[in-house]
Image (cartoon, coloured by chain):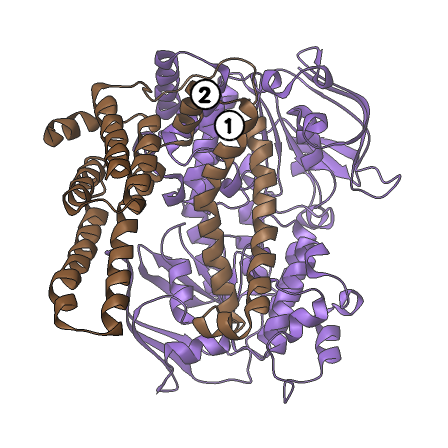
Chain colours: A purple, B brown
Amino acid sequence: MIRLKGVSFRYENAGEGVYNLKDIDLNVEKGECVVLCGKSGCGKTTVTRLINGLIPHYYEGQLKGSVFVDKTEIADQPLAKISQHVGSVFQNPRSQFFNVDTTGEIAFGCENQGLARAEIAGRIEKAAELFSLRDLLGRSIFDLSGGEKQRIACASVYAVQPDIFVLDEPSSNLDQAAVIKLKEILVKLKDSGHTIVISEHRLYYLMDLADRFIYLEDGKVKTQYTRDSLMKLSPQAISSMGLRTLDLRQINDQSGGKKNDMVSGVFRIENLLCKMSGRTVLDIDSLCIPAGETVAVIGHNGAGKSTFARCFCGIGKHRGKFYLEEQEIKAKRRLKKSYMVMQDVNHQLFTESVRDEVTLNVSDSGKGDLETVFEKMGIVSIADNHPLALSGGQKQRVAITSAVYAGKKFLIYDEPTSGLDYESMCRACTLINEAARNAELSLVITHDLEFIMKCCTAVLHIENGTVKAFFLLDDKGRERLKEEFLNIK
Amino acid sequence: MGVGEITQQIKLKLDPRTKFVLLFGVGSSCLMLPPFWLEIATFILLSLLLIASGRFRSVVKFAVILSAMISLDIIVVPNISGGGVSLFLSVARMARLILPIFMAAMLLLKTTSVSEFIISFERMRLPVKVIIPFSVMFRFIPTISEEWKSIRDAMRFRGIGISVKSVLTKPMMTLEYTMVPLLMSTATIADELAAASLSRGLDADTKRSCIGDIRLHGSDYLLMLFSVGSVIYGGLT
């Protein structure tokens, strides 16, 4: 079905002679489900682009070797033609929709082919039926959660009726429940005979689905595993390959984060109420959080996690009172003491060098030595680079350093590990723990169980706009958290 | 002219071309200082169209604003004299003139899907080279506003939030802090969006179809007639 023969590829803007893919040979049979895995930058996304034709038709560069889909060479066919056989779902739900309404989006691929209206309507019907999307039809894309968007993306590809599905890290922005829904969709696709190629960091949800795992390293196919041979590897071996856990049950990290013992007292939040366009999104009567903890804020997409974080740091409109040691802290004061590391770090880099970025709007007196902070946070070597020329991980590092240098006390992280491989996830962990040593409270919005077990000291579970549970991550807490994650349906 | 009758049909669907003509017509006639009755008629017509497309709350807001402007004109202006009067007059009248344009733009942007846009551009026989950039731009307006919200938040965390003061005292710096992240994030999104839409066959040679029923109905012709009529009337008087 899909055949890559001796393929090497170098992106136009990559360094001279640096090939992003080197001599790849790969065959995928009809009806097979193949997972591409490996560390960030190993070339797995590039392989998906070879199959859906974005290389060489959209991303330019030097291509050697040949890619065949259904015995026709990809390079000889226009993208529009390829799109009828190969459907693509991308990582970022924010940027893969061309329409602003869901029904229009599902119809989009069919409209491009010029299918008749009745035919398109029938296909939308069928896709909505198969993926249980009936309630989502006719809605605005901007009102959907990440998981809902990814389901719409799958449906819109399905409506075109391609034989092959190519998915590039589709679970990156999804919560646990949405990951399970995504898996159900993939199972249905496989059962109906579709060929699936999927590049992914999170492997656990693919274990009863995938036939083969292709492990890539530095642009080469290092090893191929069957499901069984991959399962035989120890969790340590998996981690050292840079892969995420194969089984949530196996996560057994006892390291955890460390509470900042330098601060004492308890944050008390009372009668917190937040409404958005008339709808109550957050309603918390009373909540106590010990100061100095690194709190994982978990819950479904849309449960109110971000709203809670925004209220806490005083940037979101709300009613209610916040106390530390019985002393009220008003919203304005909280905002001054807070810093949020956003999911898209590009939003918060403003200047021309890392040095300027970190010192931006920080008065010189009493903020500690800049060089020491740089050293502690590991950004000495990039101090004079342009922030926007850095890698994603480095940008995150710079953003966190800015918060530390400015002496911010409430640190909020919005899904800091989405789409990260094992190594990068560990680095983010170290960084967050380092920053937490000077913080009065760190809140981490996340869906990543492996990361929580490694980094956090407490869990705040928000569901339907209110607190479902708050508990410390001692031995008992760990068991409880794991239990909750495994029971999500 | 049977406004009620028109709105009943509107519930079916307005052709995007009609909305374009309406925006253009209302825009031109408003800038030509229409008489009071035409102003009110335009307002009522647009209100009905917006209500028919489920924008009742916005219409209430617009109605409140309009009544406030008119009462200013009627009650306040005759009772004060001097420089204040002309200032008041100009502010109130200007806002009143822009209001219908705003409403027509809202009707166009909020009730038309991207695919309807593309198809109606095609019916206007515009070349593909014009259609695709335009429709991408149309798709991009809400995205930019989403991005902008995040960037404004990020700025507030750094204590460089945008305010009247910052714009007046440090205009260049404020512009830089806004534009750099905005350009970076939108450039990435634009790139990914282009890749995603091409991989779904946006540039196919075949003639596109559309799930929406894009045809000119009686109501479309009536509305176009109204638009053209109000421009001609404005030009004559």
| Secondary element at image label 1 | helix
- Picture residue at 24% right of the left edge, 30% below the top: B229
Residue A48 or residue B199, whichever sits in front: B199
On the image, the x and y values in percent for residue A202 come to 59, 43
Residue B198 or residue B83, whichever sits in front: B83
| On screen, residue A434 above or below A95 | below
| Secondary element at image label 2 | helix
- Picture residue at 61% right of the left edge, 52% below the top: B184
> Mark 1 Cα within 10 Å, few/some/many (few <14, many 20+)?
some
Which residue was labeled with disc 2? B122
| On screen, residue A91 above or below A425 | above
Circles 1, 2 touching at the beta carbon (< 8 Å): yes
On the image, the x and y values in percent for residue B157 come to 51, 70
| On screen, residue A148 above or below A236 | above
Q: CA distance from mark 1 to mark 2?
A: 7 Å
* Amino acid bearing label 2: Glu
* Amino acid bearing label 1: Ile
On the image, the x and y values in percent for residue A297 come to 45, 61
Q: Quadrant of residue A469?
A: bottom left
Confirm whether residue B6 shows in the render: yes
Q: Quadrant of residue B104?
A: top left
Which residue was labeled with disc 1? B131
Q: Please give the count of numbered marks on the rendered protein.
A: 2
Say whether residue A481 is left or right of residue B72. Answer: right
